[in-house]
Image: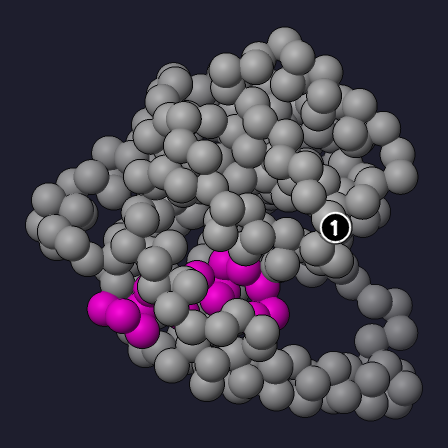
Amino acid sequence: MNKKRIAILMATYRGEKYLRNQIDSIIGQTCHDWTLYIHDDGSTDGTLSVIKEYVKQYPDRIVLLEYPSQGGACRNFLSMLERVEADYYMFADQDDIWHPDKIEKSMDVLLAAERQHPSRPVFVHADLCVIDENGHVLHDSFFQYAGIRPERMVKYEDYVHTLVTGSTMLFNHQVKEACFRRQQTDATMHDAWITLRAIAEGGIRCTISEPLVDYRQHSGNVLGAEDGNRFTLGYRLSHAQDMVKKNLQHFRMMKSAG
């Protein structure tokens, strides 16, 4: 499928509550050279009804990809990337809000990098504004909120902890090719895998320090949530087990990514 220069890939799952806000923010972009592709991963609420409503209203801009459920966000996003052909790609979460010039500013940076590094994998990522479920600002910089220092991301292993947020990414076709030159069976998340594969093949990372996405935190997606029992022995043992498991997953993914 190749309709527009930029393919925006949105994975949905039970996202009825905030989906309209996100799609409206994409439709309202200052750059219009895109097609939005959506694949739903088996929602049981009204998500599909909302998607079909927009497909009917914008048939030349929005495409519903209909194929079996993939069983999670990582596989869902990668399955769309595998099926859709375009010059450039972006990912969209179902509950965020894009700033009106997100695509335009990202494309300006990526095209400038491509002129300096022709035929290289190039990807752009940006900061985010953290908001609550009602749209109120919790922090105006996700980088500061999460302690991310993009200027210090210089080694391969610096990229494994998903410091490049998928919902802010724009990347060229060379990044897609790098992504699928290795089996993705050990990928823990689509953005981490794609970033690792791009860097492994000499890719160029470009960071935009300005927030271009309102990153919504709600009951189904809580960032940095405090745990009232975090100082108990049970919590510490559980946390240690989780960290060992997560580090083993990261190790396997880095090994698979080359």
Q: Is residue 130 left or right of residue 193?
A: right
Q: Residues within 10 Å of mark 1 (few under 14, many from 20)?
A: some
Q: Which residues are magenta?
A: 187-202
Q: Is residue 135 left or right of residue 213?
A: right
Residue 241 appears at what percent x and percent y? Answer: 76, 88
Question: Residue at 88% of width from left, 68% of height from top?
Answer: 228
Residue type, numbered disc 1: Ser
Q: Can you name the residue that lies furthest to the left here?
A: 116
Question: Residue at 23% of width from left, 68% of height from top?
Answer: 202
Residue 195 showing in the rendered view: no
Question: Residue at 85% of width from left, 28% of height from top?
Answer: 46
- Which part of the image, by quadrant, shows the C terminus? bottom left
Taking depth in this image into account, of 256 and 2 the one nearest to the observer is: 2
The residue to which callout 1 is attached is 69
The image quadrant of residue 176 is bottom left
- 24 shown above or below 241: above
The image quadrant of residue 40 is top right
Residue 52 appears at what percent x and percent y? Answer: 72, 21
Q: Can you name the residue that lies furthest to the top here?
A: 57
In magenta segment, residue 200: yes
Q: How is the image coloured?
A: one colour
The image quadrant of residue 55 is top right
Residue 193 showing in the rendered view: yes
